[in-house]
Amino acid sequence: MTSTGPEQPDQPVVPASSAEPGVGTAFAQAPKTNSLAIVAFASSFFIGVVGIITGYIALGQIKKTGETGRGMALAGVIIGWVQSAVVALAVGLVVLLAATGAAFVTQNGTATDVQTADPMPTGQIGAADFDSGYLIVGSGPVTIDVYFDPMCPYCAQFEEANGASLALAATNDAITLRLHSLTFLDRVSAGTDYSTRASSALTCEATLNPKSTLDYVAVLFANQPAENTAGLSDDELVSLAPGTASIADCVAGAEYAAWSQANTERALAGPIPGSELPSIPGTPTVLVDGAQYQGSLTDPVEFAQFVSAAFGQ
């Protein structure tokens, strides 16, 4: 019979070896209770995993030694599992509530965040025209708008074919070049929002080093990461900036991230000012005095001819 405590014999037990007449009888000692069984039972109410482990060890020992306490060992295992499950459930709920709260704060902000958040930039600083929503270089008679995403491979093709000639024309005030750096390809940057970060960094360069704006555009496309990768880090974006004034603090503070995203929403929603386009159909979208260029992205001669037509040539 199994008992939860030390067993006391009711009467002497006579070993078979002493059953013969004339041989004295001897009292057998009651089997002791396994000490780990006691530990398992006691600890299972407080630290479930201890009850489980010591309970299983106790059961193994009892099977070999014949000690008592199997009931306590089993109880320790069972209670330990129940207690561990309750703790795991409680921890899971705490984590879920914490994550939900963090998401709410991220999406809605705290009252302090809303009250102290910096307003959207306005006016013009360096090469950034915040009210109009673009970066501007040059003041020529023909206006060329280039809508691009820093992670768009087709935009890189257009930049490689035409970037240098556009930069030369804008620098010499032959054209007015307006750059619209969009962010809709954040979705293919492995969760790092690369397009937003690169667009914000470009705007930092345009405000702090306006003369280096087009050089930085060229550098970003020369080092363009592939889609579905994390893209360049903030430190790499800073190190690539060609201007003399550091953009490190501006990039670290993501000062123009919200502005870049707002420009993207405006471009995708439309209408496009000075053009018949209801919205931007994709990137790159290039407008010459409001007329959309739909030729080859990699043929600089074809593009130059399209631009020349705007000059009446």
Image (tube, rainbow, N blue to C red):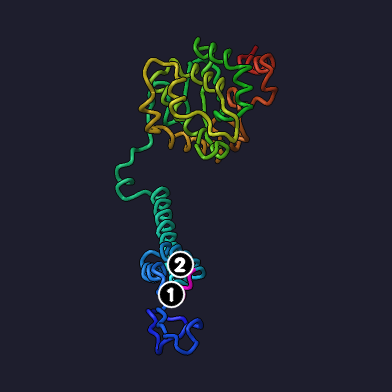
Place of residue 146 in the rendered image (x, y in percent of width and height, measured from the top left): 56, 25
Q: Residues within 10 Å of mark 2 (few under 14, many from 20)?
A: many
Q: Nearer the viewer, residue 103 or 47?
A: 47
Task: Answer whether residue 35 is visible to the viewer in this image.
Answer: yes
Residue 91's place in the image compared with 249, above or below, is below
Residue drawn 45% across the image and 62% down it: 53
Mark drawn on residue 69: 1
Q: Amino acid at mark 1?
A: Gly
Residue 300's place in the image compared with 180, above or below, is above
Work out which residue is located at the far front of the displayed protein and give it: 22
Work out whether mark 2 precedes mark 1 in sequence or the reverse, and give the earlier one: 2
Magenta stretch holds residue 69:
yes
The CA span between labels 2 and 1 is 8 Å
The residue under label 2 is: 58
Residue drawn 50% across the image and 9% down it: 172
* CB within 8 Å, label 2 to label 1: yes
Left or right of 309 in this view: 99: left
Looking at the rendered structure, the secondary structure element under dot 1 is loop
Magenta stretch holds residue 16:
no
Q: Residues within 10 Å of mark 1 (few under 14, many from 20)?
A: many
Looking at the rendered structure, the secondary structure element under dot 2 is helix
Quarter of the image where the C terminus is located: top right
Q: Which residues are magenta?
A: 65-71
Q: Quadrant of residue 12?
A: bottom left
